[in-house]
Image (cartoon, rainbow, N blue to C red):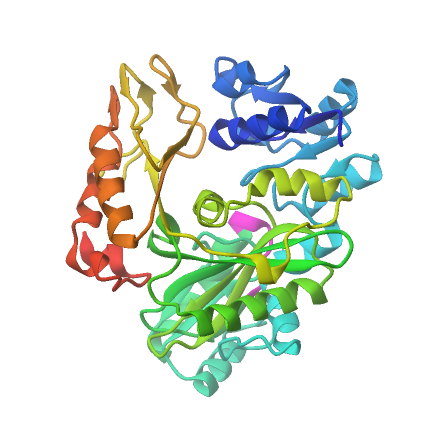
């Protein structure tokens, strides 16, 4: 086991990793920007190093500063969490060259899965279903038009690198293709430094369903079921649950087998998530692979009893998976609500000082957060301030439990999206499990 791990992140995920380290008897080292000096992760860790000013580019995204902190602190490994450098192959490669264990897949695998074109090609080669697409990056408008005619409108133009909806354009007609194509390339270049785009058939009103995979460094790969992530705004997830109301045992097996097949073929190690679109006819299509722990990993932990962060650390030390696929059992139902510091109607971020705080509790309630009364939510970073997760025997009971927990949760001094979550939980379509990726746009 490692003696010391540096956590290259902040907020609730940094606290989550620190807690796992403590339970494993591993010393943890936090890094922080000057704006984060009073953050909870700096208090909970066994040590903390300032790596730069508030701006992410000068601190949490500064590879040189973080690698230097690892070396100064004499840490053996680094956990990237999610966001920031978690899927940055250059960071993983820098760690490898310096003899630092990166708790995640290899830099080569990250490069492969980080490029959507390469990832889709590999999935297609392995017989994992994909939507009809251009099979290559598109050089110009003429080529884009030819491909779109062949595939059939509507189509999606997507950036080869990155995600989060940036560099993505939905095109319904030939007349609007040229402007959308050029706009997508400009957005992709600005956001990711890579202007490559491709086109795929647009899947109308699909669900977003992802499979959690776990792979050790000895060739053993299993999946831990699925997460329903369809409730999202501008491609950013808001509420997740497991199991998905749309899947039965047969479909779960098919999707899980496809995810495991892909992970094995590319030599994937550690935890990762294979994301799929599921259409109204229950056909699923590979979308991408996230080479890190997900924000929504707690719902999987609650229904399987597997601590995914501890598994990440154990795998990185070379341990073999103890859990076999045949022994994976999904128990009950779990829901996660992402609590954001934002106006629940306009979605405008709402940084500021927390003046009052009442936390939910009771049976089956988990709260992952780094906030406290008197804490100031900073404007420099993502506005996710907490993840409220519940577990119950049935989906109906989980909805009731989440409603009760949200009603207990009070954060004074700032606005949050708690009212939006309460509204979603009372919606007839949500209660019936009738959701898709456009649910929230129609709902609000």
* 360 or 369: nearer the viewer: 360
At a point 45% along the width and 52% down the height, the residue shown is 164
Q: Is 206 situated above or below 187?
A: below
- Would residue 150 be found to the left or right of residue 442 on screen? right
Picture quarter with the N terminus: top right
Residue 168: quarter of image:
bottom left
Residue 146 in sight from this viewpoint: yes
Q: Position of residue 275 (x, y in %)?
A: 50, 61
Q: Position of residue 244 (x, y in %)?
A: 37, 60
* Residue 276 part of the magenta-drawn span: no
* 441 or 261: nearer the viewer: 261
Q: Position of residue 233 (x, y in %)?
A: 32, 51
* 401 or 167: nearer the viewer: 401
Residue 283: quarter of image:
bottom left
* 114 or 429: nearer the viewer: 429
* Stretch of the chain drawn in magenta: 190-197
Q: Position of residue 441 (x, y in %)?
A: 24, 56
């Amino acid at each position: 086991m490692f003696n010391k791990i540096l956590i290259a992140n902040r907020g609730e995920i940094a606290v989550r990793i620190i807690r796992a380290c403590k339970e494993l008897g591993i010393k943890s080292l936090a890094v922080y920007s000057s704006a984060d000096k009073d953050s909870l992760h700096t208090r909970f860790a066994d040590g903390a190093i300032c790596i730069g000013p508030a701006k992410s580019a000068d601190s949490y995204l500064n590879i040189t500063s973080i690698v230097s902190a690892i070396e100064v602190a004499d840490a053996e490994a680094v956990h990237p969490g999610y966001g920031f450098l978690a899927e940055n192959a250059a960071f993983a490669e820098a760690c490898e060259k310096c003899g630092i264990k990166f708790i995640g897949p290899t830099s080569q695998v990250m490069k492969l899965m980080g490029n959507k074109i390469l990832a889709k090609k590999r999935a297609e080669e392995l017989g994992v279903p994909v939507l009809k697409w251009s099979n290559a990056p598109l050089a110009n408008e003429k080529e884009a038009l030819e491909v779109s005619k062949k595939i059939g409108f509507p189509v999606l133009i997507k950036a080869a690198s990155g995600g989060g909806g940036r560099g993505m354009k939905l095109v319904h007609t030939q007349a609007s293709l040229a402007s959308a194509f050029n706009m997508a390339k400009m957005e992709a270049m600005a956001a990711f430094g890579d202007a490559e785009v491709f086109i795929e058939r647009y899947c109308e009103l699909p669900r977003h369903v992802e499979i959690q995979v776990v792979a050790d460094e000895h060739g053993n790969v299993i999946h831990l079921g699925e997460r329903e992530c369809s409730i999202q705004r501008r491609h950013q997830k808001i509420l997740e649950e497991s199991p998905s109301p749309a899947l039965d045992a047969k479909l779960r097996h098919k999707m899980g087998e496809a995810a495991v097949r892909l992970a094995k073929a590319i030599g994937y190690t550690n935890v990762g998530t294979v994301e799929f679109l599921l259409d109204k006819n229950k056909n699923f299509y590979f979308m991408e692979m996230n080479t890190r722990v997900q924000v929504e990993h707690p719902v999987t932990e609650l229904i399987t009893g597997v601590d995914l962060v501890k598994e990440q650390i154990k795998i990185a030390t070379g341990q073999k998976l103890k859990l076999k696929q045949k022994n994976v059992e999904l128990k009950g139902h779990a829901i996660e609500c992402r609590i954001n510091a934002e106006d629940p109607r306009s979605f405008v971020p709402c940084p500021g000082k927390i003046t009052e705080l009442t936390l939910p509790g009771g049976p089956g309630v988990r709260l992952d957060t780094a906030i406290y009364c008197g804490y100031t939510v900073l404007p420099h970073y993502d506005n996710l301030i907490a993840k409220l997760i519940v577990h119950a025997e049935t989906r109906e009971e989980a909805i009731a439990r989440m409603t009760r927990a949200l009603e207990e949760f009070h954060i004074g001094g700032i606005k949050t999206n708690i009212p939006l979550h309460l509204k979603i939980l009372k919606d007839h379509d949500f209660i019936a499990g009738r959701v898709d990726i456009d649910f929230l746009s129609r709902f609000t």
